[in-house]
Amino acid sequence: MKGFLVLETGEIYEGSWMGGSARAGEVVFNTSHSGFEEMATDPSYFSQILVTSQPMQGNYGVEDLVWESSQIHIRGFICLEMQNSKREASWLNRLVHKQIPVLTEIDTRKLIFRLRDQGTVWGALVDEPNQEQALIEAKILIHQAKNKDKDWVNLVSVKEPTPFKGLNAKGPRIAMLDFGFKMNILRELQARSKEVCVFPSRSTFADINAWKPDGIFLSNGPGDPADVKVAPQTVKDLLGKYPVFGICMGHQILALALGYETYPLKFGHRGSNHPIKDLVLDKIYVTAQNHGYAVVTNANGPDDLEITHINLNDQTVAGLRSKKLNCMSVQFHPESHPGPHDAAILFDHFIKDMVGYDSI
C-alpha cells in the first residue's frame, strides 16, 4: 500500500505503508546499528518520527525486558526494510498494534542527507492515494501537532512521587527529577542505592527536600529545555544543598539553573557511536546520545565552572562541573541502551565522589 512522508517544507518521500495511523512529528534520524525497541520506547523520542540509518529493522524480534519505558513514544517509524515474514514480524506487528505508522522502501540515505544538510524539520506520515491529498492531510496534522503543549517533559514525566527499592542496603537515597527517564537509568541507580524516588518534573524544592535525599539525579527527556517549566528554578534551589548530577535534558536544565543558555542543534545527536573527550580524565568515550539541543556557556555561571567533556564531532559542550556547588552533568547517556557502556563509571563517580558513599 502506498504511503508518504511529507515534510513541512514541501518535500515528499513515497514508500510502502506497512500499517498504523497517520501522524505528525519532528523527523529525526538515529545512526545506531541495533536497538530499535530501546529507541522507540525512550521518552526522549516523544513526538518525533524516527528514521533509522541502519537499513534492516525488526530482524531480531522483540523482548519487553529491553524496553526503556512502558510505552512506545515515537510518532512514526521509517526504515529502508522491515522484517515481515512468516518466521518473524513481531516488531512490525507491535508498532501497528500501537497505531504507530510504519513507512518502508524509501531512500533513507537521501532523507538523512536532507536532515543533516538542511536541519531537523516537522513532517507527517500519511496513507493517501496520491501526493496532492498527502500534502493536504499532512499540513493539517503538522499544524495540530505543533500547536500542542510544548513542555514535552511534563507530558512524559511521572505524575506523583514514585519510590523504588534499591539493591544496595548501604547505599544512599537518591531523588530523581523525572524529565522522561529511561529504565536503565533507574536500574543503574538502584544497583548503587538504598532507595530511589522519582519526582515529577514540576516538583519544587520543598517537595524533594521533604523526602530527605542524599543526592539529586536529573534525567533525560524530550523537547526544548527552554520550554520546561518549574524545573530550572527547582534545580537552582537545590544547588549547593545537595549533590546534583544530570544527563541529557538534565544537563541542559542544570545549565539553565546555572545561568547559561541552550540552543537548537542543526540536526541533533542521535546514535550510539558519538565520540566524547573527557577533559578531566584525558579519555575518549564512545557514547549513546539522543538530543536536539546543546549548552552555550557564558560569564553568568559559577566562578569554578569547568567544561569537562567535549563532543569530538562538532566541539559542542558535553559536560559541566562545579566543585563548589558539587554538581556535574553530561550531554550523553552513560546508561547506554542501546550503545556502548564506556561511560557507565559516571554513576560510580556520582555515588562515591559526589554523594560520598563508598559501599558500592
Image (tube, rainbow, N blue to C red):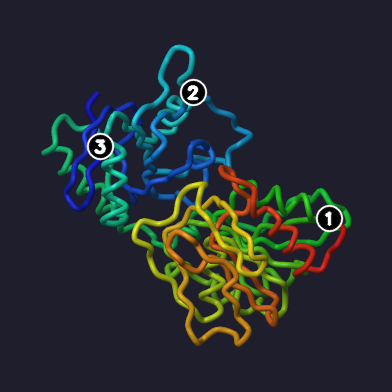
Q: CA distance from mark 3 to mark 2?
A: 22 Å
Q: Which mark is residue 360?
A: 1
- The correct choice, above or below, for 45 with respect to 216 in the image is above
Q: Nearer the viewer, mark 3 or mark 1?
A: 1
Give SS at disc 2. helix
Residue 205 image offset from top left, x and y in percent = 65, 74
Q: Amino acid at mark 3?
A: Val
| Residue shown at 30% from the left, 40% from the top | 109
Q: Which tag, 1 or 2, sits closer to the chain's start?
A: 2
Horizontal side, residue 61 vs residue 326: left or right? left
Q: Amino acid at mark 1?
A: Ile
Q: Which mark is residue 90?
A: 2
Horizontal side, residue 179 vs residue 6: left or right? right
| Residue shown at 63% from the left, 34% from the top | 65
For the residue pair 80 and 144, the one nearer the viewer reads as 80
Residue 341 image offset from top left, x and y in percent = 64, 47
Question: In which image quadrant can residue 31 be found?
Answer: top left
Q: Are marks 1 and 2 in contact (CB under 8 Å)?
A: no
